[in-house]
Image (tube, rainbow, N blue to C red):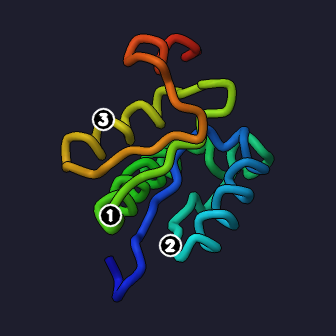
């Protein structure tokens, strides 16, 4: 918490840029401080695909999770990729509550659509 405001970090595939923007708006209107991704690799930010930049961004996103009270997973069509799965596992390991845009029915289903 920062003052009376819960801090939430958004996680999910950057192919869902529109859903990220919508969740950021809705959570902000709920009175939450929202931390999001800095670049949308699957939506045109080509710099992400440099291995050194990708590693830095992945680590940086874990630090954003450290700063948050919880995470909100953008899992449109229940899709959760490798990086997002790693972020969920990290959040759970560090005791952060995890909420989902679309609730998975089971742990297995949560990861079934990975490519």
Q: Residue at x 60, y 25 (%)?
A: 79
- Secondary structure under the numbered disc 1 in the rendered image: loop
Which of the two residues, 34 or 58, is positioned nearer the viewer here?
A: 34
Q: Is residue 82 left or right of residue 38?
A: left
Q: Earlier in the sequence, mark 3 or mark 1?
A: 1
Q: Earlier in the sequence, mark 1 or mark 2?
A: 2
Figure quadrant of the N terminus: bottom left
Which of the two residues, 26 or 63, is positioned nearer the viewer here?
A: 26
- How packed mark 2 is, by other alpha carbons closer than 10 Å (few <14, some 14-19, many 20 or more), is some
Q: Nearer the viewer, mark 2 or mark 3?
A: 2
Residue on which disc 1 sits: 69
Q: Residue at x 69, y 67 (%)?
A: 25
Q: Position of residue 91 (x, y in %)?
A: 30, 46
Q: Nearer the viewer, mark 3 or mark 1?
A: 1
Tell me the tag on residue 89: 3
Q: Position of residue 53 (x, y in %)?
A: 52, 52
Residue on which disc 2 sits: 32
Q: CA distance from mark 1 to mark 2?
A: 10 Å
Residue 39 sits in which quadrant? bottom right
Residue 92 sits in which quadrant? top left
Q: Position of residue 77 (x, y in %)?
A: 68, 25
């Amino acid at each position: 918490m920062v003052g009376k405001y819960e801090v939430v970090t958004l996680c999910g595939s950057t192919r869902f840029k529109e859903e990220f923007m919508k969740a950021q708006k809705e959570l902000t209107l709920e009175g939450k401080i929202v931390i999001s991704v800095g670049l949308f690799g699957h939506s045109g930010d080509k710099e992400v695909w440099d291995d050194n930049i990708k590693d830095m961004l992945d680590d940086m996103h874990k630090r954003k999770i450290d700063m948050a009270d919880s995470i909100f997973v953008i899992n449109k069509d229940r899709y959760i990729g490798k990086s997002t799965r790693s972020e969920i596992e990290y959040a759970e390991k560090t005791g952060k509550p995890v909420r989902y845009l679309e609730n998975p029915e089971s742990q297995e289903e949560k990861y079934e659509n990975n490519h």
